[in-house]
Image: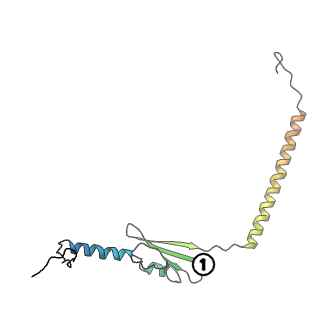
């Protein structure tokens, strides 16, 4: 004979839930997005080349990211990139080295031109002052004007 004890709880039997596979899949996807993602260091694609002819022969990156090709003597850097119309574009960046001797000659020429301009303006201003002071005063006609 079995007695009923209201204080004793019997273990619950798991009931079948038709949506349980979807809940399991959802939990799996949420766990996937909560994990830290692998972070990759940013890097530039490319290699050192001898001339632009080598760059023209290289395949273009199909992802649309530019590929950089520095010239071996470091005077130019070529960037090759896929365009939206399916063609590739090569942009050339050239190194510019300031020439100190050429710069000094240029600044000396500029100073000489400015000095000449100053002298010409001074002469013109002096000539205008002489013209103004040498003109006789004009007489008034038709009454007093103030």
- Percent across and percent down for residue 53 are 48, 80
The one nearer the camera, 102 or 24, is: 24
Q: Which colour scheme is used?
A: rainbow
- Percent across and percent down for residue 135 are 88, 31
In the image: residue 114, left or right of residue 3: right
- Percent across and percent down for residue 71 are 55, 81
Residue that appears at 13% across and 78% down = 3
In the image: residue 66, left or right of residue 18: right
Q: Which residue lies furthest to the left in this view?
A: 1
Residue that appears at 41% across and 79% down = 59
Residue that appears at 34% across and 76% down = 31
Q: In which quarter of the image is the N terminus?
A: bottom left
In the image: residue 50, left or right of residue 133: left
Occupied quadrant, residue 5:
bottom left
Label 1 neighbourhood size at 10 Å, few (<14), some (14-19), many (20+)?
A: few
Residue with the mark numbered 1: 75
In the image: residue 36, left or right of residue 132: left
- Percent across and percent down for residue 77 are 55, 76
Q: Quadrant of the C terminus?
A: top right
The one nearer the camera, 37 or 11, is: 11
Question: Against 118, is 54 above or below?
Answer: below
Question: Against 134, is 26 above or below?
Answer: below
Occupied quadrant, residue 103:
bottom right
Q: Number of callouts in the render?
A: 1
The one nearer the camera, 129 or 1, is: 1
Question: Against 7, is 131 above or below?
Answer: above
Mark 1, secondary structure of its residue? loop
């Amino acid at each position: 004979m079995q007695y009923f004890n209201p204080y004793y709880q019997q273990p619950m039997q798991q009931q079948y839930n038709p949506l349980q596979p979807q809940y399991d899949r959802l939990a799996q996807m949420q766990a996937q997005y909560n994990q830290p993602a692998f972070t990759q260091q940013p890097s530039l694609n490319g290699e050192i080349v001898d001339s632009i002819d080598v760059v023209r022969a290289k395949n273009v990156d199909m992802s649309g990211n530019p590929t950089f090709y520095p010239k071996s003597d470091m005077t130019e850097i070529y960037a090759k990139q896929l365009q939206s119309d399916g063609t590739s574009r090569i942009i050339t960046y050239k190194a510019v080295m300031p020439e100190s001797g050429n710069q000094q000659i240029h600044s000396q020429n500029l100073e000489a031109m400015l000095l000449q301009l100053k002298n010409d303006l001074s002469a013109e201003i002096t000539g205008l002052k002489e013209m103004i002071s040498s003109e006789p005063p004009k007489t008034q006609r038709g009454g007093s004007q103030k």
